[in-house]
Image: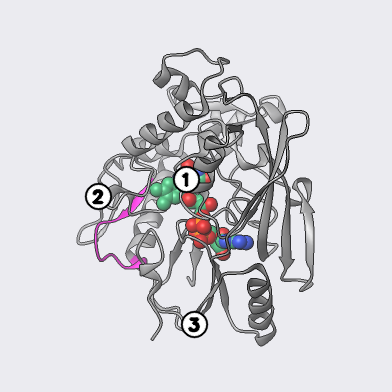
Amino acid sequence: MTKALSELTSMRVGGAPAEIFEAVTRDDLIEHALEVWRSGDDWLLLGGGTNMVVADDVSQLRVIKVATRGIEVQPPKNGKVLVRVQAGENWDDFVAHTVEQRLAGIEAMAGIPGTVGAGPVQNIGAYGQELSDVLVRVEFLDFATHEVAVLDAKDLAFGYRDSAIKRGRPGVITWVELELQDLDGLSRPLYSTQIAADLGVGMGDQVELAEVRNSVLKLRAQKGMVLDAADPDSVSCGSFFTNPIVSDRFARTLPSEAPRWENEDDDGLTVKLSAAWLIENAGIGKGFSLAGSKAAVSNKHALALTNRGGASAAEIVELARFIQERVANKFGITLVPEPNLIGF
Ligand SMILES: Cc1cc2nc3c(=O)[nH]c(=O)nc-3n(C[C@H](O)[C@H](O)[C@H](O)COP(=O)(O)OP(=O)(O)OC[C@H]3O[C@@H](n4cnc5c(N)ncnc54)[C@H](O)[C@@H]3O)c2cc1C
């Protein structure tokens, strides 16, 4: 009997699959993925399991767990440093490593759980930084062709919490290459009002990378957004819904106090709304749960759904659907789940 996926995912739901194969080298990863694909069986690539809700019955699924390791740092060129990281490295440990090496570019993404290889899938981001800001290329085993190719950032067509892979180009990222900067241990001019306010500095100031990282870890912990065995609010997938992007015209039909951010890429034709605000203002507060359910909205953040202990995957999805309906009825917006729903 294999382990249940509830033991390998941060939401702690999911049944036992047919098989879990742990790939510790790039070659094993490629070879095993090809073998599974040729068999025609259902498959799942698993990193840290922090961005998925796995169904209670996945007994037919063959799971490939990415556990490859390795970080190679190239010598600096004109203050730029290329770093190649194997997919199974832990993202947060990798961020800590780059901060220790005094390399700028991903310090504000400290505390995002999961693996490096999953990062490009939804173009992870937080506190004013996104992976696409620094990603140069990835190695990709393409499900459609069964070929290994090196894809440049532009091939991945990144968007907000989105990429070509997420939109339906399945495959395996084996390594990721980033371009970081040597700014004498300092960050780029500060890009996040929340970090600036926390550190008591101005936007645009440059501060020690370690200070940025510590500030982010503190801010995230206050919202239950770092994995912490002692914090029941972190038994989650992080944000359960993406912030909706709507036309400026539609946004003007919403209450004026609804937070919104202009999209600079299209001169404000579209705006991003706060999913957390929409949820709370549709009458679903922090800590909310359906009667008799062990799934609940986090006590710290309206955007995170949590497993209060022993919840089934069905209970998590039932709560998510309830929230979607409430928000749609009140504001005419269908919230889109951020995590991958596996086996539903
Ligand atoms: C408490 C908490 C806070 C979070 N905060 C943030 C945040 O601030 N910003 C943010 O962007 N995300 C956040 N997340 C979501 C999550 O951490 C990221 O999406 C992370 O990149 C997922 O990594 P993982 O290894 O756990 O992926 P998994 O959950 O294992 O997989 C996610 C998806 O990627 C695929 N995948 C995994 N590895 C690979 C690979 N090597 N090649 C191709 N596909 C692959 C999987 O098949 C699956 O479809 C948070 C999650 C939690 C639990």
Q: Position of residue 230 (x, y in %)?
A: 24, 50
Q: In the rendered image, which residue does mark 3 sit on?
A: 19
Q: In the rendered image, which residue does mark 2 sit on?
A: 230
Write down the region rendered in magenta.
Answer: 304-314
Q: Position of residue 89 (x, y in %)?
A: 54, 56
Q: Which picture quadrant has residue 309?
A: bottom left
Q: Which of marks 1 and 3 is nearer the N terminus?
A: 3
Label 2 element class: loop
Q: Earlier in the sequence, mark 2 or mark 3?
A: 3
Q: Are marks 2 and 3 in contact (CB under 8 Å)?
A: no
Q: Which of marks 2 and 1 is nearer the N terminus?
A: 1
Of 47 and 340, nearer the camera is 47
Of 152 and 334, nearer the camera is 152
Q: Is residue 52 above or below residue 243?
A: below
What's the amino acid at mark 3?
Glu
**Label 1 to label 3: alpha-carbon separation:** 27 Å
**Label 2 to label 3: alpha-carbon separation:** 30 Å
Q: Does the residue labelled 2 lie within 8 Å of ligand 1?
A: no
Give the residue displayed 76% in from the left and 74% down from the top.
146
Q: In the rendered image, which residue does mark 1 sit on?
A: 112
Give the residue displayed 40% in from the left and 21% down from the top.
198
Q: In this view, does 226 lie above or below 277?
A: below
Label 1 element class: loop
What's the amino acid at mark 2?
Ala
